[in-house]
Image (cartoon, rainbow, N blue to C red):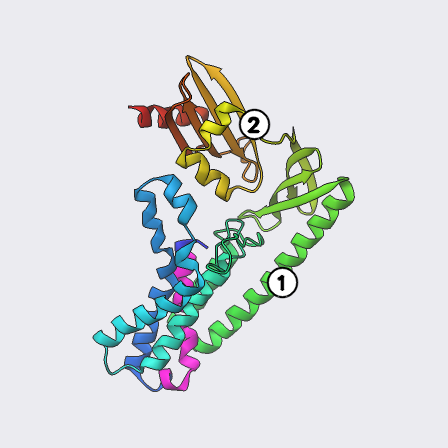
């Protein structure tokens, strides 16, 4: 989820904690728990600072080790230790318990996005991405904000957020049901379907669709249950090509390939250099595929420059590559 949603979820958990008799009976513990749930709800995303290095490092590592099993155990211990040092009168066990819940919930809800997490590291480095909730979901965010407003106007915080989370649980079930129905529709309409990747959008009944068959990649949308295929590409295995083999050593392309499950590629030559371009097919928007990896190589197959990330026009991509070169 996005930072704003994780923040309001942290506040919501702090409100829910008022149902805990120990928290309710101690203002110091209640304050410490609220700090713990807010910080815990944000802590796993500390790896966002990797963007300051480059996109390749960020793509390869974001929602990786900071969302892993050891991290879910260590974050609450670290946060609780700091809070206890500042607020020694707070009940340590209950601060840890609610902080742990905040960290766990952060990682748990992230697996429902199309981006996913490596939540089972070190058991497996596989990305878990269920693809039923958009990274920013207006309904989930708005429901939390409504609960916070009701609390501010005097509603019981614990009961308010019990209701909020019950409604959200039903909402998740509805999203899974809709996803299942869309996949059934696609399988019935498209023969030899091998894999279906659905990416939810901010609009409740609008999904991005990427389908892999035995021969093609199909890209489209699903709006109100109606699936429309807008692009199709022949499914071509990556050939044993010296240009491609050289490009694979680039850190940006390597990061892209470690993350993207469905893509097409282009190889071209112009202006005395080779261009290798990989295009993720999951995120088509306004007729454009914004998530790409591009590598330029000279005639000796030495890498000149490269880029991976989100680009919404060819002109901006060229500027990025020129900036890297210069």
Q: Is the magenta stretch mostly helix, strand or loop?
A: helix
Q: Does the magenta stretch include residue 139?
A: no
Where residue 32 sits, quadrant-wise, is bottom left
Q: State the residue in front, 162 or 37.
A: 37
Could you say which disc has been placed on residue 240 in the image? 2
Residue 74 visible in the picture: yes
Q: How far apart are marks 1 and 2 (CA)?
A: 44 Å
Is residue 162 positioned above or below 113 on the image? Answer: below
Q: Residue furthest left?
A: 86
The residue at 34%/87% (across/down) is: 25
Q: Of tags 1 and 2, which is closer to the observer?
A: 2
- In the image, residue 180 above or below residue 244: below
Q: In the rendered image, is residue 14 in sight?
A: no
Q: Give how far across and how far down residue 210 sits, in percent.
A: 62, 40
Q: Which of the marked residues, 1 or 2, is nearer the chain's N terminus?
A: 1
| Apparent side of residue 205 relative to residue 27 in the rendered image (left or right) | right
Q: Position of residue 138 (x, y in %)?
A: 50, 54
From the top left corner, tell me how far across and down residue 131 is, in percent. Answer: 57, 52
Residue 185 position, x and y percent, is 74, 47
Task: Give residue 284's mark.
Answer: none
Q: Where does label 1 land, which residue? A: 173
Quadrant location of residue 36? bottom left
| Highlighted range, magenta | 4-23
Q: Quadrant of the C terminus?
A: top left
> Furthest-top residue in view?
271
Identified at 58% across, 39% down, the residue is 262
Q: Report which quarter residue 87 is drawn in.
A: bottom left
Classify mark 1: residues with Cα within 10 Å, few (<14), some (14-19) or many (20+): few
The residue sitting at 48% across, 51% down in the picture is: 135
What element does badge 1 sit on?
helix
Classed neighbour count for the residue bearing mark 2: other residues with Cα under 10 Å, few (<14), some (14–19), many (≥20): few
């Amino acid at each position: 989820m996005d930072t704003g949603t994780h923040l309001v979820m942290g506040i919501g958990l702090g409100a829910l904690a008022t149902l805990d008799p120990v928290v309710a009976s101690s203002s110091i513990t209640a304050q410490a728990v609220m700090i713990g749930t807010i910080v815990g709800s944000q802590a796993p995303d500390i790896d966002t600072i990797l963007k300051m290095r480059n996109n390749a490092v960020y793509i390869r590592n974001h929602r990786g080790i900071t969302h892993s099993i050891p991290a879910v155990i260590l974050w609450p211990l670290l946060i609780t230790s700091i809070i206890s040092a500042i607020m020694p009168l707070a009940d340590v066990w209950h601060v840890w318990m609610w902080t742990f819940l905040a960290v766990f919930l952060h990682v748990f809800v992230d697996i429902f996005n199309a981006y996913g997490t490596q939540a089972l590291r070190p058991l497996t480095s596989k990305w878990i991405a269920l693809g039923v909730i958009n990274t920013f979901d207006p309904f989930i965010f708005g429901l939390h904000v409504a609960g916070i407003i009701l609390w501010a106007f005097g509603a019981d915080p614990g009961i308010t957020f019990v209701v909020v989370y019950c409604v959200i649980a039903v909402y998740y079930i509805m999203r899974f049901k809709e996803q299942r129905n869309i996949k059934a529709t696609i399988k019935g309409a498209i023969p030899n379907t091998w894999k279906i990747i659905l990416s939810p959008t901010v609009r409740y009944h609008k999904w991005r669709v990427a389908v892999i068959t035995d021969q093609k990649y199909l890209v489209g949308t699903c709006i109100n249950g109606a699936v429309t295929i807008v692009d199709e590409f022949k499914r071509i295995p990556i050939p044993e090509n010296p240009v491609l083999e050289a490009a694979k050593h680039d850190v940006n392309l390597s990061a892209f390939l470690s993350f993207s499950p469905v893509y097409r590629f282009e190889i071209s030559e112009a202006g005395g250099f080779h261009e290798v371009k990989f295009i993720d097919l999951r995120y088509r928007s306004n007729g454009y595929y914004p998530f790409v990896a591009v590598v330029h190589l000279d005639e000796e197959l030495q890498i000149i420059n490269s880029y991976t990330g989100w680009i919404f026009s060819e002109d901006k991509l060229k500027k990025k590559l020129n900036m890297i070169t210069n």
